[in-house]
Amino acid sequence: MEIAAPSELVDCPLTTKDSNQFLKTELAALHPLRTDQAISGSIAELVGSMMRRTKPTIVEIARTIGISRRTLQRQLAAEGKSFSKIVDTARRDAAIAALAAADTSLGDLSFQLGYARQETLTRAVRRWTGQTPSGIATASVKIDD
């Protein structure tokens, strides 16, 4: 697991003897829930930011915001959402943006989005858009010209 933190956090002295509590408090401050939107929106933002460095799980997200996995599931269900749908949407948005930019190979993009194989990403892109990944990249090149 990799933790990215601003340099001012790394350089500050511990103010408590419980380093685990310190980390929980400071990490939660790095990923605060926005109070001006539904929890699903905040979770989508967290998933998007975590996806760049690790495959986000519901347990990690719940731990980051300081609630149990089951509480998070209940809150999402109350909004008619599910964690898997939020992750799927974040993957879709990231995949389409990367394919349109044509700056990443399909193999690398598959890995970055947490897919075990390139074929799985290709099937997902077809499901989302009705096009192949190369079709999206070609269409975006035509639009840019």
Image: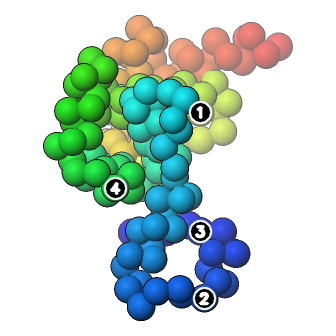
The residue at the point 27 percent across, 46 percent down is 58
- Name the image quarter holding residue 132: top left
Query: Helix or strand or loop: what does disc 3 sit on?
Result: loop
Q: Amino acid at mark 3?
A: Ala
How many residues crowd around disc 4 within 10 Å: few (fewer than 14), some, or many (20 or more)? few
- Contact flag, marks 3 and 1 (Cβ < 8 Å): no
- Contact flag, marks 4 and 3 (Cβ < 8 Å): no
- Contact flag, marks 2 and 4 (Cβ < 8 Å): no
Q: Nearer the viewer, mark 4 or mark 3?
A: 4
How many residues crowd around disc 2 within 10 Å: few (fewer than 14), some, or many (20 or more)? few
The residue at the point 28 percent across, 51 percent down is 67
Instruction: Say which residue label 2 marks.
Output: 13
The residue at the point 74 percent across, 10 percent down is 143
- Between the residue at mark 4 and the residue at mark 1, the CA separation in whole angstroms equals 32 Å
Q: Quick one: label 2 or label 1, which is nearer the N terminus? A: 2
- Contact flag, marks 4 and 1 (Cβ < 8 Å): no
Q: Quick one: label 3 or label 1, which is nearer the N terminus? A: 3
The residue at the point 27 percent across, 17 percent down is 80
How many residues crowd around disc 3 within 10 Å: few (fewer than 14), some, or many (20 or more)? few
Q: Which mark is residue 98?
A: 1
Q: Which mark is residue 132?
A: none
Whether residue 97 is visible, yes or no, is yes
Instruction: Say which residue label 4 marks.
Output: 66
- Between the residue at mark 2 and the residue at mark 4, the CA separation in whole angstroms equals 23 Å
Query: Helix or strand or loop: what does disc 4 sit on?
Result: loop
Whether residue 91 is visible, yes or no, is no
Q: Quick one: label 4 or label 1, which is nearer the N terminus? A: 4
Instruction: Say which residue label 3 marks.
Output: 5
Examine the rendered structure and indicate whether residue 102 appears above or below residue 66: above
- Name the image quarter holding residue 102: top right
Q: Quick one: label 4 or label 3, which is nearer the N terminus? A: 3
